[in-house]
Amino acid sequence: MTRYRPLCAIHPKRFSFPRKSGEYFLWLTRETCLTRDEINITWLIDRGTHSAVYIPYGKGYEYYVHERSFMRVLKRLDADITRNWRSHLARYDRKKRAILRTAKKLSSAAEQDDTAVTLHAFDTYTNAIYAFCEYIMGAWAVIYFIEPLIGKRVPSLLNTIYALDRPIEFMKLQRDLHRLSSATLIRRYGWLNVYSPYDASYTAAQIGALKRQTREKDVARSFAQFRHAHRRFRDILTATKDPTLRRKMEIAHEYAYLKTDRIDVWRKAMHGTAPFYRMLAKRFSISLEDATNIPHDEIRRHLSQGLPPAQFIAHQRYKTDPLWCFEKKTLAAVNDAPAISKTRSVLQRVELHGPIRGTVACGGTARGHIIYVAHSDDLKKVRKGDVFLARYTFPSYTPAMRKCVAIVTDEGGLTSHAAIVAREFGIPCIVGATHATSILKNGDRVIVDADNGIVKKIR
């Protein structure tokens, strides 16, 4: 088994700026922390991706990756998953349990304040995350290489293929909202509000708000559909004679669930490792958020040699959100504002004219005013009849999305959270509408033609 070897943190003066915008594309926009994302990018680089650049954007980061090499990696991953589907699926639960088990051990080691034990626990945990990257990136292989094939071959069967046949964790929370006390819900599901170790669990007030927004009859209907969804999918799988298409359909169907569940594994792990990062924050008199952005090789250097994170202390690079550049064997953090601006201008490719196009996740046509949800803090602004616009969505966005007449996202495919919610509730939805959030603004009146995958401004 390939082990995780952290990238070497280097002086930012050695950072080489991308010079051709066409070599990179905007892959994701997310809130980020190195403790999570460094391992994913290292996994991609180890398999042939040339480089990635994370540029600060609002409260999150824009993730740019070297397009040609990135797509080659995902294409090989798609081929490997298809060829070894049964073993790929069989490994999932084992690797999932390994992450949660090692996260707990890392937390326990940090609380014991035994440096040698903590180093071993840290290495074991990061290796478990690294091994799980085949599923983190597997979802993107499905989006880029399997979903287009299925959409072309069997477009009339998309709703059946991508229908969930078992509940994700947020749906279990919704089911239990009217059954269990707030304290029990927080203890059992509080981690669902966590994306990075510095995030807080759900509060009683947040649980109360979710309870008010969630109708028991809607949850009961969703759970009642699982058995039918499973049966319908098995029927079409049996009726499909082409073995290659049948295998692709099976992968796409399973990843409709895994796409969310794999992130839930992350959430629970991030929640579980918070004591370790609180320990680092205390040792270096820094914030918990800063502690989650110390590169892994510097953490190892500290734990193995007792040294402070040299790059971290010397360059004080976390006083502002840095640009991160990941390349073969190296990681650089750049705080220089002109350099960040220069890199952004090279990498950004936004066409501000003509209709916005994306992938149809749920058909229909709707008109309304745009409400742009850039962060979970914006959910309270959503009103009934709005057109929900976001770069991406999470399960916790669901109650707000249901108020809207249409959903448009920059990212995602037919197995994305936005697509699943839209199909479940019959809301016109377009996903993968790249740069929609750069073109549309709050209050814009639009028509969402989700039969043809087009969004247009109207007067």
Image (cartoon, helix red, strand yellow):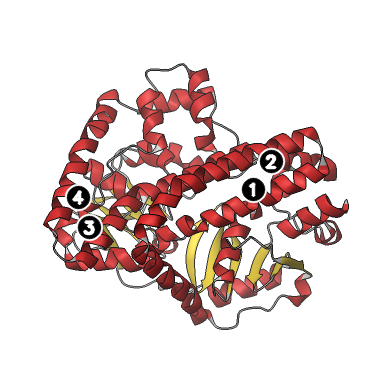
Residue sitting at x 18%, y 53%: 364
Instruction: Tell me which amino acid carries mark 2.
Output: Leu
Dot 3 crowding, Cα within 10 Å, few <14, some 14–19, many 20+: many
Do the numbered discs 2 and 4 sit on residues whose CB atoms are within 8 Å?
no
* Quadrant containing the C terminus in the rendered view: bottom left
* Of the image marks 4 and 1, the number of the one nearer the N terminus: 1
* Of the image marks 3 and 4, the number of the one nearer the N terminus: 4
| Mark identifier at residue 106 | 2
Numbered disc in front, either 1 or 3: 1
| Mark identifier at residue 160 | 4
* Of the image marks 1 and 2, the number of the one nearer the N terminus: 2
Query: Which of 104/152 is in front?
Result: 104
Instruction: Tell me which amino acid carries mark 3.
Output: Ala
Secondary structure state at the residue bearing disc 3: loop
For label 1, the residue is 125
Numbered disc in front, either 4 or 1: 1
- Compute the Cα span from label 1 to label 3: 43 Å
Secondary structure state at the residue bearing disc 2: helix
Do the numbered discs 1 and 2 sit on residues whose CB atoms are within 8 Å?
yes
- Compute the Cα span from label 2 to label 3: 47 Å
* Quadrant containing the N terminus in the rendered view: bottom right
Residue sitting at x 55%, y 26%: 203
Image position of 400 (left or right of 331): left
Do the numbered discs 1 and 3 sit on residues whose CB atoms are within 8 Å?
no
Numbered disc in front, either 3 or 4: 4
* Of the image marks 2 and 3, the number of the one nearer the N terminus: 2
- Compute the Cα span from label 2 to label 4: 41 Å
For label 3, the residue is 450
Do the numbered discs 3 and 4 sit on residues whose CB atoms are within 8 Å?
no
